[in-house]
Amino acid sequence: MDVIDSRKIDPGFKHQIAKEEGGEGILKCFACGACTARCPEMDVKPEWNARVIIRKALLGLKEEVLSSEFIWVCSAHFRCLEKCPQKVNVKEVMNAVRDERLLDEQIEDVTGKKTKKYLDMDFKYAITQTKGGKDLYECFSCGTCTAGCPERELDALYSPRKVIKNVLLGMKDSVFANRFIEICSSHHRCLTQCPQGVEIPKLMNAMKNIAIKEGYSRESKLEKTYDKKN
């Protein structure tokens, strides 16, 4: 285990989370691990550990918590809530942590108006205005589509739920860079199991078409990344 650097601790971080809607449960957690034992995300990646994230938040390790992938992929299965002796809603806590991350990224432009770095908050509206994107607002990120997706056999990180979540958060570059929007097929397993009847293939196709119209090129992005590293 790495030694904690006290200079990187923010004692008020847990209270910032608790002030966010849904984040108050973090102060009830005593890190028993019941949530982690029931979490299906752990089957995808062992590092996605709810107990560890909450423990780090309580310790004030703000940078480590905000840089974690788990705050973006935590889904609404509520298995953790069923088993938690303190009835901590981990999903709501992760939403609060994510809100803190977005607030942390706020900057002011020359007019003093606050905006979000790297975020396009109009992206979701552009998708819903397309023929195949009308179902976007029906999704509440339960994760049923991802659980039954055969593309995950190719790569465990292929997740329609994560793509949709990124859209709603305005993370357009992340969506366009995700290969899943290109390989999502029309097997319709997701549609038959989705409680909201969301047609995932049509949504992914809508995103792909917008990427094409805006001139997004995966190759050019990779070239820029390579140039920066060299």
Image: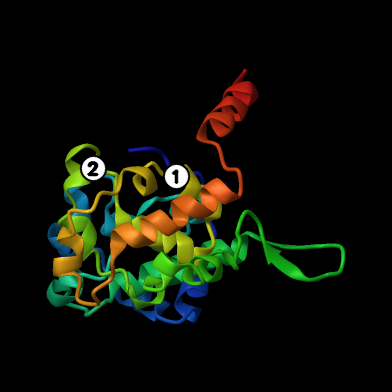
Protein image colouring: rainbow
Quadrant in which residue 12 is drawn: bottom right
Q: Nearer the viewer, mark 1 or mark 2?
A: 2
Among the two numbered marks 1 and 2 on one chain, the one whose residue lies closer to the N terminus: 1
Counting other residues with Cα less than 10 Å from the Cα at mark 2, is it few (<14), some (14-19), or many (20 or more)?
Answer: some
Relative to 17, does residue 148 appear above or below in the rendering? Answer: above
Residue 84 at what x, y percent from top left? 17, 73
Quadrant in which residue 202 is drawn: bottom left
Amino acid at circle 1: Ile
Q: Residue at x 61, y 61 (%)?
A: 120
Relative to 60, does residue 173 appear above or below in the rendering? Answer: above
Q: Relative to the observer, which residue lies in front, 153 or 219? A: 219
Examine the rendering and report whether any part of residue 160 can be seen: yes
Q: Residue at x 27, y 76 (%)?
A: 88
Relative to 31, does residue 177 appear above or below in the rendering? Answer: above
Residue 189 at what x, y percent from top left? 15, 59
Q: Residue at x 26, y 70 (%)?
A: 76
Query: Under tag 1, what secondary structure?
Result: loop
Q: Relative to the observer, which residue lies in front, 200 or 104? A: 200
For the view shown, which residue lies furthest in the front direction? 131
Quadrant in which residue 106 is drawn: bottom right
Q: Which residue is mark 2?
A: 156
Residue 60 at what x, y percent from top left? 47, 59
Examine the rendering and report whether any part of residue 13 can be seen: no
Q: Relative to the observer, which residue lies in front, 125 or 111? A: 125
Q: Which residue is mark 1?
A: 4
Mark 1–mark 2 Cα distance, whole angstroms, equals 31 Å
Residue 161 at what x, y percent from top left? 32, 60
Amino acid at circle 2: Ala
Quadrant (top left, top right, bottom left, bottom right) of the C terminus: top right
Quadrant (top left, top right, bottom left, bottom right) of the N terminus: top left
